Image: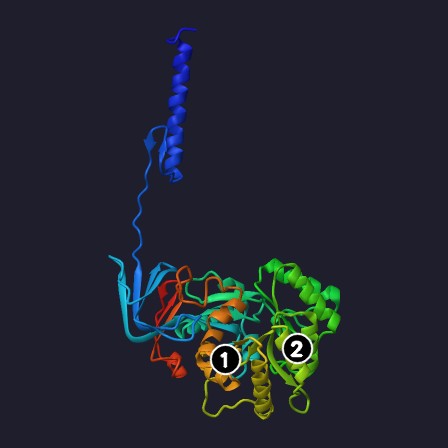
Amino acid sequence: MRADTPMRGVFMAWVVYVSRLRSTTDVRRGDLGHRRGMANCIVSERRRLTAIRASWLFDGAGSGLVADPLVVCDGPTIVSVEADGVAPEGADVVGLDGATLLPGLVDTHVHLAFDAGPDVVGSLATRDDEGVLASMAEAGAASLRAGVTTVRDLGDRNYLSLRLRDRSDQPTVVAAGPPVTSPGGHCHYLGGVAEPTVCGVRAAVREHVAHGVDVIKIMASGGNLTAGTRQECAQFEPDVLRATVDEAHRHGLPVTAHAHGTSAIVDALAAGVDGIEHLTFWSAEGVDCPEALLRAVADQRIVVGATVGLVPVAGLAPPEAIVSRLPRIMANHRRLYELGAPFVAGTDAGIAPIKPHGVLAYAPPMLCEIGLSAAEALRAITSVAARVCGLGHRKGRVAAGYDADLLAVDGDPLTDLTALRRVRAVYARGDAVRI
């Protein structure tokens, strides 16, 4: 066939058509580079870097302060941290003279669904889910303003906390959904009731997995907020607790147990939980002090979720049952610290007026009463807490590659822990929070 035949003309027309079609598709896809000799470039304006300069830095990992830090953020990510550094050309520079920068704080135990009022259970019962969700968003915003940029919600209603996880106006939320509990058990009104059998709790865990939770919370004992339950009484048989942990671990989820009573603590420990909340060794008469059990908790590296941090409220005081037991509870925690057990601060924010959302800044002095140094207390609410929440690779430290969650306070928190309450600025994922 001759090169100039009509068939060749048809073929060349088809090639031209396909080339044009591909070029159009490449532009739509934002393809950069050369295709068949054609360059298709899409240019977008690059966001400006933010350079934050303060007088001091506690980076979440060390024990001292770094002088004259410069923290450079590219949107939600820290890209560099230098002492006495030079801000990149064109960066937005924020000066915080006299302030100390820290990682955004991490509270490992909150209840966003509770409004920190005088009757949190009754108040919750009066609101539908949309009303509860709106209240939870307000609680999250209050946490942010206090410098708490990550919260682990260990008990919501009907999985509502999962709906806050991707909102830009909220802290980073690690969500348990409604805690797994027994019929009529502690916090049964939140919707996590499971048949107290091996099959029942396995089904409950699978339901939580299907909803996409980050952690399983189980009520191993009764609690103060639920009439008809007793803190010293276990709610599940040992084999049922073991099945809960086994099923959760099979799905790659950690388990933390609410456990006051000594028998519930023994069972949770034997079940292989990852953490225990409260850990008060509560008995009907007072507080047990079982040395062998304390050693076992420390030896197994069970994370102690110490319920610390409260705001004094005129005319309000903790119940007498708690006040009378508190010295021995603190003594047990001090012994756990001496034995090497890891501690975090789980404030239980939301459960009472003395536990408002954002109360975490009041926790470190109580950790120091247990025996932690000021630096250890700060790490317990930053880097250690982030690891416990499964976020240690990107939260809890001020370092390159970590999320730009930052708290600036007036003063030196290593010598004066009340400085944490003097909030100067907060950044959550690189965005300044209005305080």
Q: Is residue 181 visible?
A: yes
Q: Quadrant of the C terminus?
A: bottom left
Task: Give the quadrant of residue 196.
Answer: bottom right
Q: Nearer the viewer, mark 1 or mark 2?
A: 2
In this rendering, is residue 409 above or below 40?
A: below
Residue type at the position of mark 1 = Ala
Give whichever of 208, 113 is nearer the camera.
208
Marks 1 and 2 in Cβ contact (< 8 Å): no
Q: Which mark is residue 293?
A: none
Residue type at the position of mark 2 = Ala
Task: Give the quadrant of residue 158.
Answer: bottom right
Q: Crowding near pointer 1: few (<14 within 10 Å), some, many (20+)?
A: many
Helix, strand or loop under label 1: loop
In screen coordinates, is 132 left or right of 8? right
Q: Residue at image x 46%, y 88%?
A: 312
Q: Residue furthest left?
A: 89
Q: Which mark is residue 116?
A: 1
Q: Residue at image x 70%, y 63%?
A: 202
List x then y, in percent, for residue 377. Answer: 47, 78
Residue on which the image places disc 2: 296
